[in-house]
Amino acid sequence: MPLENFNNEAIILAGGSGVRMGREKQYLPLAGRPMIERTVEAFVSSGLFSGVILALAPENLKKHGPAWEKAGVRTAPAGATRMESLRSAFRLVSPGAGLVAVHDGARPLVAPALIEACLLAAASAGAAVPAVPLKDTVKAVSADGKFFESTPPRASLMAVQTPQCYRRRVLADLLAAAAEKDYSDESQVLEQLGIKAAVVPSDYRNIKVTTPEDILIAEAFMKETKAVTSRSRAPLARAGFGYDIHRLVEGRPLVLGGVKIDHPKGLLGHSDGDVVLHAICDALLGAISAGEIGVYFPPTDLTIMGISSSAIAEKTLEVLASRKARIINVDATIVAEEPKLKPHYEAIRDSVARILRLEKDEVSVKAKSREGLGEVGHGEAIMCFAAASVLK
């Protein structure tokens, strides 16, 4: 069943005392930011959850709770044990939630792909637990801890992680069955209920920060991931802004967005004076930090006198292509007292879309007046503002 059919919520348990760390670990800096912020961000930014609930120790709830609530993260008081903390946070889970993810606040490097895989497996099986193969041989020891007694077959053992994901009803049954007993891992209770959790293969980067050495390991993983990302970065959306103004004079054709408009005056310029295309092209070049159209078509170059602004747009498209950038959309606002441009909106949109090789719904054109103010308001000039976004 697709995940969008579920209303998913996440519980992040961050109420531990950090005995093995020697101090409280959730707010220790990890690569310059508190570790718990990175953990919460992984869930909030995944886009998979309608809500995130954070269980904090009383002192942190008082100190940091208001800021988390303001950021849209609900908070709950952590208990003395893991199960008490989980029970406290579960009270805030919406009755309509379909799937609930339970995660350790000290696992800040959890990947979105792993979160999604666990949710999908839980949607099918009722419960899902991420795990990795054991690297070391494991031995059982005597009650006094002095002697090894047996060696379980390593192939049948795995080290479990979080997020452990459940259908809401399964997690409710699990908490009821646990009663007042504490468990280091709530999925242990599933065995009492006769429910088999699905195994979700994970990786060793999803480390739980427990000791000081783990901080160093986690930061090393982060540096490695950043290095890989910088070599194969996904395209990012970038925005640019453009502006142009030309004087209106008699004896010149009026061209806006590549459309010739019937008017006794036209725009004076080195080219055809098309302020719409000029502003849009400057916005596109600005979005990729490639200067402005004067760099490519300087007004001192007399050989291009009277050049069509469509040619300027064509050159802009070439520059975008050389930078591996693709236009997402453009939005132009023409400021003119005359002529009235509303009847020409659709023709200009069609023309700009054709020139820039876009769909019409990726082009917006509108006009405003200056209410009689300034040279534009006196009918002496027309100007245009443009915004553009690209993927690069």
Image: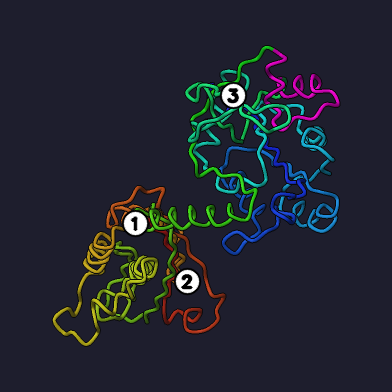
Q: Alpha-carbon distance for marks 1 and 2? A: 43 Å
Could you say which disc has been placed on residue 231 in the image?
1
Mark toward the start of the polypeptide (2 vs 3): 3
Tell whether 25 sits left or right of 137. right
Q: Label 1 vs label 3: CA separation?
A: 34 Å
Rendered image quadrant of residue 90:
top right
| Badge 1 amino acid | Arg
Residue 338 spot, x, y in % from top left:
44, 72
Q: Secondary structure at mark 1?
A: helix
390 or 27, which lies in front?
27
Q: Which segment is the magenta one?
A: 170-193
- Which residue is labeled 3 in the image? 122
Badge 2 local density, few (<14 within 10 Å), some, or many (20+)? many
Residue 367: % across, % down: 48, 64
Give the farthest residue toward the top. Answer: 194
Say whether marks 1 and 3 touch (CB < 8 Å).
no
**Viewer-nearest residue: 74 or 372:** 74
**Compared to 2, does 224 lie above or below?**
below
Choose mark 2 or mark 3, whichever is in front: 3
Q: Main secondary structure of the magenta part?
A: helix
Pick the residue in front: 69 or 268: 69
Mark 3: secondary structure = helix
Q: Nearer the viewer, mark 1 or mark 2?
A: 1
Determine the residue positioned at 48% across, 56% down: 220
Q: Marks 2 and 3, how far apart in space?
A: 56 Å
Amino acid carrying mark 2 in the image: Val
Q: State yes or no: residue 183 in magenta.
A: yes
Q: Badge 3: how crowded within 10 Å, few (<14), some, or many (20+)?
A: many
Please give the count of numbered marks on the rendered protein: 3
Is 261 contained in the magenta span?
Answer: no
